[in-house]
Image: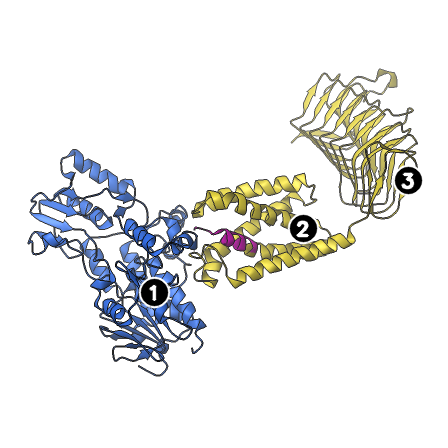
Chain colours: A blue, B yellow
Amino acid sequence: MSGAQRCAIVGGGLAGLSAYATLRHGGLAAAEIAVFGTDPDPAAQWRRRAAAIRQRRMRSESDGHVAPASFPGLAVRSAARQSDTWPLILSLVDRYHPTVSEFLEHVAEVRERSGWDESFERHTVASVRAVDGGFAVDDAGVFAHVLLAPGHPGLALPGELAGDPRVVHAYEPHEYADEVEVLGAGMAAATEWLNALAAGASVVSVRRREPERRPLNLPRHLFTRRGLRAFHRTEADERALLLSGWSAPSYPPGREWDDPLEEAQKQGRFRVAAELDGASQIVAATGFRRGFQHDRLLARLVAEHHLDTVEGWIVLTPDSTVPALTDGDRTLSLAGVPGQWAFPAADTLAGAKYAARRFLRRVKACRSR
Amino acid sequence: MSFTLRGRLETRLAVSLLPLLAACAVALVLAEWWPLELAAIMIGVGVVLDSVVYHRTFPYQSGWLALPLGLLELGVVMAAVRGAHVGAPVDFALLFFGGAWLLGQVLVHGGFPLARLSYAEDGGELGKAGLATAAVAAAVFASAGGVAWATIPPTVHLSAGIHQGPIVLDHSQKLVGDAGAVVRGGIVITSDDVTVENLAVTGGEIGIEIDGAENVKIEHVRVSGTSLDAIQARRASVTIRDCLIHSPVGDYAQGIDISFGFDLPPSLIEGCTIVGGREGIVTHFSNVHIRSNHVSQTTLRALGLTEMSMVMVEGNDVQDSLGVGIYCGDYSECMISDNVVGGTRPDTASGDLTRLGFALVAHSGAKAEVEDNELSRNARAPKAFLGARITAG
């Protein structure tokens, strides 16, 4: 660590890039920030998963990006690039969803423009410990302000399917057999239904509850202070209940989803079942493991510092910082999915920016900076 | 975007700050209050709608809603401007509102998110800047209100009963009659910025005489029994609303005469009822808007617009005139629309061929542009004489 480095971002994914770009926008030099990750391409992990489920468009809308300011959003950029007002019109009615390639181009642009590679170090962090003057990040140095964005702690797979050779997780590369059972009912599952049908397979949707239909991961007001105020006022048990409820599967409404399924149903190629039924391929669209205990870095942090937790969540203040380890001189912030205690949609791009902006505010307000 | 109530109000005040300062500048340049009154109405309507309607109705507000909500606000603002008799020209008011709305959209969607990264997720709240903006807006209004209060003309109440005139108003003031207040012998106004309200004037040659004064308002007055003009304005700019003029005395009495003020701000006569007299409303070399009046039983013509006047005549009801209903003469230019003219009778006793019961006459090089008038039971259709023209609008 150079003597000037004050901030560390642990996690080199999209949440890390969003935080980095926000810090740079806020006036921090590249030399003041260290980024620790496993791949210098911040979109590497996300790109693999999107490719696995053959995702073509983002669920997020114009402001689902990693740039520090909401404006200009991806709709404005697309309109300017193509000299076409259609993306703007779609955005006005909340119907603009950028393509995956547009989003990845944007990520590459932010990476380039922000100077991400100047600060990036290929290093898998095993430990973050509170020490005098901040936090020791392994033996890489002591930083006054640390933002942890470790990403999802691995893919979730039902225990009874472990070792079953027919099973592939939706986020792993795969092709489709003639008969496919898709386990789950969220966005990835819905995408897999259409993928498998398009590949000519017969599909059984195996689900234990009906998915909700909503445009974004969560109701819109939960992305802003209007909805968050009530959320932040809840007691711990109630908040955990709310978060569990909001993790129920959902995918967007719209004919682009419904029409192919109706058509396949008429042809006898799509049906819903409550149990697995012996198909030759099982696609587990079951998302990610949940809870800090599945992430070695977070589990160790909690254990070593006796942090408050509720079920699988680390208790955070509304600005996404760990209260026991944050004061006027140092900051420990969680971004991405571990930040859900502060922001229910923490695992979205909006959530990444929520944590990043508040982290920047803390850093700039720090007495010793 | 999901605005919090505080976010809505801070955003509203912040986007209104520049238009408010622009209104202050225009008010200073023109030495008029209406730009500030217009801005105050615009901001006030916005704040009320934000608090009472929008916040409850729209937990989430999609971008496209800005347009219909903007149109709704425009309608309410224009209605309030009209209802409060704010003297803002319509084209200026539309331009001002449109410019402010556009600026608001640019700031909400671009400027504020750039200046404050968490603007959207904070529900439109601007932090310390929001409080500062509110303070500045409040300071501007407080300053303007203070100046207005300090310079507001005094109000004089005339108690019920008969007051012997003539009453001379030679300095800026507001003369308000209590119920039953009557002035006998007339009122003379020689100062700018005079308002006369809720009075009955009776007798004398001229009921209310305005001479060389601007920004004079005559509202809710009743004038009767005068032998010349019920209301006479010479080289004046006057607004006359909701008056009642009747029972003239003698052959030369007429209703309202506005003359020789062509180079002054236009005058307005609106919502008056005039019964009898030679001419109901007459203009000479003046710029006048005559709107929504009822004029009946005149003996020369109901509306006489002459001597190079420029007059807009709309929505009036002219009935039972002798000779001529509406007369546009002597190189005047008259835009005559949406009026009802009925029962105009021929004046055969005069021997004048231009007075044979015409609903409308254009005379001596005048130009009358007519549109959507309803003419019925008149002895003659409209006609032009001596180089005058009547054209369809």
Disc assigned to residue A18: 1
Q: Given this view, does label 1 or label 2 mark the residue nearer the observer? A: 1
Q: Residue A307 in magenta?
A: no
Residue A146 position (above or below residue A184) = below
Q: In the image, A102: left or right of A25?
A: left
Please count the marks in the image: 3
Residue A72 position (above or below residue B295) = below
Disc assigned to residue A223: none
Determine the secondary structure under disc 2. helix
Disc 3 and disc 2: Cα gap in Å? 33 Å
Does the residue at mark 1 contact the one at mark 2 (Cβ under 8 Å)?
no
Chain on which label 2 sits:
B
The crowd level at tag 3 (other Cα within 10 Å; few <14, some 14-19, many 20+) is some
- Is most of the magenta stretch helix, strand or loop? helix
Q: In the image, A3: left or right of B57?
A: left
Q: What is the x, y in percent for residue A7?
A: 35, 74
Does the residue at mark 1 contact the one at mark 3 (Cβ under 8 Å)?
no
Identify the residue at image location x=23%, y=60%: A47
The quadrant where residue B155 appears: top right
Chain on which label 3 sits:
B
Chain on which label 1 sits:
A
Determine the secondary structure under disc 3. strand
Residue A182 position (above or below residue B283) = below
Residue B31 shows in the view? no
Q: Which badge, 3 or 2, comes first in the chain's sequence?
A: 2
The crowd level at tag 1 (other Cα within 10 Å; few <14, some 14-19, many 20+) is many
What residue sits right under mark 2 in the picture? Answer: B35
Which one is nearer the viewer's eye here, A205 or A88? A205
Q: Which residues are magenta?
A: B1-13
Identify the residue at image location x=68%, y=56%: B142
Q: What is the x, y in percent for residue B230?
A: 86, 31
What residue sits right under mark 3 in the picture? Answer: B167
